[in-house]
């Protein structure tokens, strides 16, 4: 294998700006305080019910210093670091970023300059995450690498006793999901605080509206609809021999060079866009239902990506079924189109709702959330800092893993053309990524790795024994 001298973490692009659809009326640039969130699980994988209160400001006394590192300083990691700094400023606490980890030396240095971190604490290469999180002062790790690395890196944080903010999604297949569930349980045992990048859980309009839904404002939930339908395709950074990548650096010629440069287009790194983006909306559905679906069936395909390198699809339509028989209809896409929509809708026996801010009951009564609300990307860090400094119950690791598995279930139902169950995903043994990913991803090297043919129903099924996959070349 070819090897680079660098040793963690992969960069990740930023969260995507919401495309406003006809039912969406929200702003992520407004400001406020989050009031209350409740999460209840009722399956064999569930932990105990938890309710968490989130004040908008902390009292000035008695706060331990917060010392953070950012692992993965692409667009999203850079954004999350800035959100952390704004949260620290809002709360008036002693907090700062003291370390950086990224796969590429150029990115690590750039992150150091951005957050005023000394060069000797800017680590690069596949093992950089370990060097960053094991800095002795660190008690807050921001994980913003491509999703394929989330499980082993979160596990390392938990074993090191670090509180974590991690971006979504958190797994790409059954083995990474099981790693996440085990680490989530251990993080609870250690009383670690964990927040996930499902920022709607920290957004006042969603919190208040969904609380009213739970309190019966629209009666019993009958059906849900969730959308992340973009009006254009996702980015693609080109391949070796083409112009320089988005990151301004020459890409090597190994399989892993190519895949890491275009991580969104490889299943083991991204999970496909149904996981990487649409998990937000699926998480809202699970939040409303206070559970996860048990099975689904799906369709979709690869239309406008054409011959561009990569494995993913550019559209999915999925029908999910919850344990109580309620169905959720899920739509996501990454193609040029005139119609686009990113939001959620709920039908109840006594009314309808847009979970971000609106309820209409049968008979004409309406509710609309109109208060100012703080940027949820900042609020989620404020909530985590509050939980750390005041020993409050905040651990979203299992919750976000449930929502990620929900997305994986829909993806595999589409890829295979078969109905797929939640437990089937969790218990599956096929691993999309390199074998070393879960055993010790810090020791990975640039070199050869399989590239899949974009999945085709009847020609792709990871649940078969042996799994059915089509490999290029």
Image (cartoon, rainbow, N blue to C red):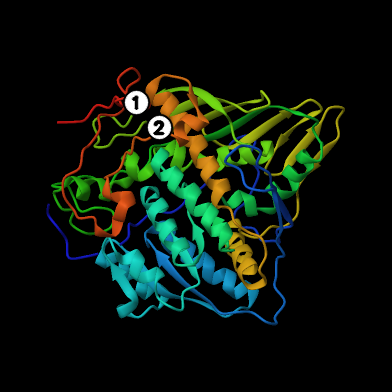
In the rendered image, which residue does mark 2 sit on?
Answer: 335
Quarter assignment of residue 76: bottom left
Q: Is residue 34 left or right of residue 71?
A: right
Q: In the rendered view, does 296 fall on the left or right side of 464? A: right
Q: Give the quadrant of residue 273.
A: top left
Q: Residues within 10 Å of mark 2 (few under 14, many from 20)?
A: some
Along the horizontal axis of the image, is 69 left or right of 2? right
Residue 310 position, x and y percent, is: 27, 37
Secondary structure at numbered mark 2? loop
**Is 96 located above or below residue 419 in the figure?**
below
Residues at discs 1 and 2 in contact (Cβ within 8 Å): yes
Q: Which mark is residue 426?
A: none
Q: Is residue 16 visible?
A: no
* Residue at which label 1 appears: 303
The secondary structure type at the circle numbered 1 is loop
Which residue is depicted at the point 47% across and 49% down?
180
In this rendering, is residue 275 above or below 247?
above
Q: How far across and how far down the image is residue 374, in percent? A: 65, 60
Which residue is rendered at x = 34% and y = 77% of the image?
A: 121
- Residue lying at 55% horizontally and 48% vertically, measured from the top left: 398
Task: Give 374 or 402, whichever is nearer the viewer.
Answer: 402
Q: CA distance from mark 1 to mark 2?
A: 8 Å
Task: Tell me which corner region of the image, top left, top right, bottom left or bottom right, holds residue 196.
Answer: bottom right
Task: Of the two numbered discs 1 and 2 on the same chain, state the one appearing first in sequence.
Answer: 1
Task: Report crowding for label 1: few under 14, some 14 to 19, many 20 or more residues within 10 A (C-alpha).
Answer: few
The picture places residue 473, in percent across and down from the top left corner, at 14, 31
> Percent position (x, y) of residue 132?
37, 70
Q: How many marks?
A: 2
In-front residue for pair 468/375: 468
Residue 271 visible: yes
């Amino acid at each position: 294998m070819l090897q680079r001298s660098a040793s963690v973490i992969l960069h990740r692009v930023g969260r995507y700006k919401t495309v406003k659809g006809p039912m969406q009326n929200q702003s992520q640039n407004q400001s406020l305080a989050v009031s209350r969130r409740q999460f209840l699980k009722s399956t064999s994988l569930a932990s105990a019910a938890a309710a968490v209160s989130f004040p908008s400001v902390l009292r000035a006394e008695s706060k331990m210093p917060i010392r953070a590192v950012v692992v993965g300083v692409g667009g999203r990691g850079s954004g999350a670091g800035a959100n952390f700094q704004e949260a620290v400023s809002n709360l008036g606490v002693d907090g700062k970023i003291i370390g950086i980890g990224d796969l590429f030396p150029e990115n690590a240095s750039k992150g150091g300059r951005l957050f005023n971190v000394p060069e000797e604490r800017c680590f690069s290469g596949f093992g950089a995450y370990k060097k960053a999180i094991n800095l002795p002062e660190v008690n807050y790790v921001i994980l913003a690498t491509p999703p394929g690395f989330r499980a082993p890196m979160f596990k390392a944080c938990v074993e090191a006793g670090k509180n974590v903010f991690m971006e979504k999604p958190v797994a790409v297949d059954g083995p990474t999901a099981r790693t996440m569930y085990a680490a989530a349980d251990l993080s609870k045992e250690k009383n670690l605080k964990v927040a996930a990048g499902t920022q709607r859980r920290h957004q006042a309009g969603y919190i208040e509206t969904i609380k009213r839904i739970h309190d019966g404002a629209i009666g019993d939930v009958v059906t849900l609809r969730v959308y992340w339908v973009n009006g254009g395709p996702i980015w693609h950074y080109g391949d070796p021999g083409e112009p320089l990548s988005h990151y301004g650096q020459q890409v090597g010629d190994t399989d892993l060079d190519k895949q890491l440069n275009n991580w969104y287009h490889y299943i083991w790194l991204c999970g496909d866009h149904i996981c990487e983006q649409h998990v937000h909306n699926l998480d809202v559905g699970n939040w409303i239902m206070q559970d996860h679906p048990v099975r689904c069936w799906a369709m979709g395909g690869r239309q406008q990506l054409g011959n561009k390198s990569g494995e993913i699809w550019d559209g999915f339509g999925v029908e999910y079924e919850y344990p109580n028989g309620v169905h959720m209809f899920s739509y996501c896409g990454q193609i040029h189109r005139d119609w686009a929509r990113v939001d959620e809708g709920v039908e109840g026996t006594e009314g309808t709702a847009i979970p971000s801010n609106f309820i209409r009951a049968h008979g004409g009564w309406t509710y609309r959330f109109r208060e100012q609300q703080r940027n949820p990307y900042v609020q989620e860090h404020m909530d985590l800092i509050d939980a750390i400094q005041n020993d409050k119950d905040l651990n979203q690791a299992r919750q976000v893993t449930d929502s990620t598995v929900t997305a994986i279930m829909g993806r595999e139902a589409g890829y295979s053309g078969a109905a797929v169950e939640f437990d089937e995903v969790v218990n599956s043994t096929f691993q999309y990524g390199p074998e070393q990913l879960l055993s010790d991803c810090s020791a990975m090297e640039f070199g050869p790795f399989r590239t899949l043919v974009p999945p085709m129903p009847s020609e792709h099924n990871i649940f078969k024994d042996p799994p059915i996959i089509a490999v290029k070349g």
